[in-house]
Amino acid sequence: MNNFTKIEKYAVINILSCIMKADGIIDPKEEEFMNHIYNSFAITISDLENISSIDIIQAYNIIRSMTSEKKRQVLPLLVGMAQADGFIHPKEKDIINSVR
């Protein structure tokens, strides 16, 4: 996970946050999954402020412009967040498909 640039990490977390909120319910398992990502990306409190300043369109564009290898690493994270609560909501699926 450390091969991502800081801005790429921010974009991934931004999209993960959208997936987490997509069905209108934030499940504790989704929060656990996000905390795991924060730890693996070494995200700090100040990073969280910077992440919130990126809008969803920017986040999509950053991920779309990643190398194929990086995209292959991102997809399981997005699917993992969608599956964290045991159910992939259609809105979550739409977000994941929008990144491809």
Image: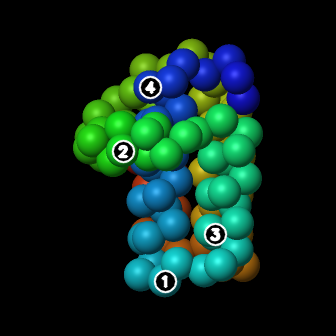
**How many other residues sit within 10 Å of disc 1, few (<14), some (14-19) or many (≥20)?**
few
Residue 22 horizontal/vertical position (percent): 42, 71
Q: Which residue is mark 2?
A: 49
Mark 1 vs 3, N-terminal side:
1
Residue 59 horizontal/vertical position (percent): 37, 37
Placement of 61 over or under 65, stated as above or below? below
Residues under labels 3 and 4: Cα distance?
Answer: 22 Å
Q: Quadrant of the N terminus?
A: top right
Image quarter for residue 72?
Answer: top right
Q: Is residue 49 left or right of residue 79?
A: left
Task: State which mark lies toward you, 4 or 2.
Answer: 2
Q: Residue at x 70, y 74 (%)?
A: 29
Q: Amino acid at mark 4?
A: Ile
Q: Which residue is mark 4?
A: 7
Residue 25's disc number: 1
Q: Is residue 54 left or right of residue 97?
A: left
Q: Amino acid at mark 3?
A: Glu
Residue 14 horizontal/vertical position (percent): 43, 47
Task: State which mark lies toward you, 4 or 1.
Answer: 4
Residue 30's disc number: 3
Pointer 4 and pointer 2: residues touching (CB < 8 Å)?
no
Q: Secondary structure at mark 1?
A: loop
Mark 3 vs 4, N-terminal side:
4
**How many other residues sit within 10 Å of disc 3, few (<14), some (14-19) or many (≥20)?**
many
Q: Secondary structure at mark 3?
A: helix
Task: State which mark lies toward you, 2 or 1.
Answer: 2
Residue 89's disc number: none
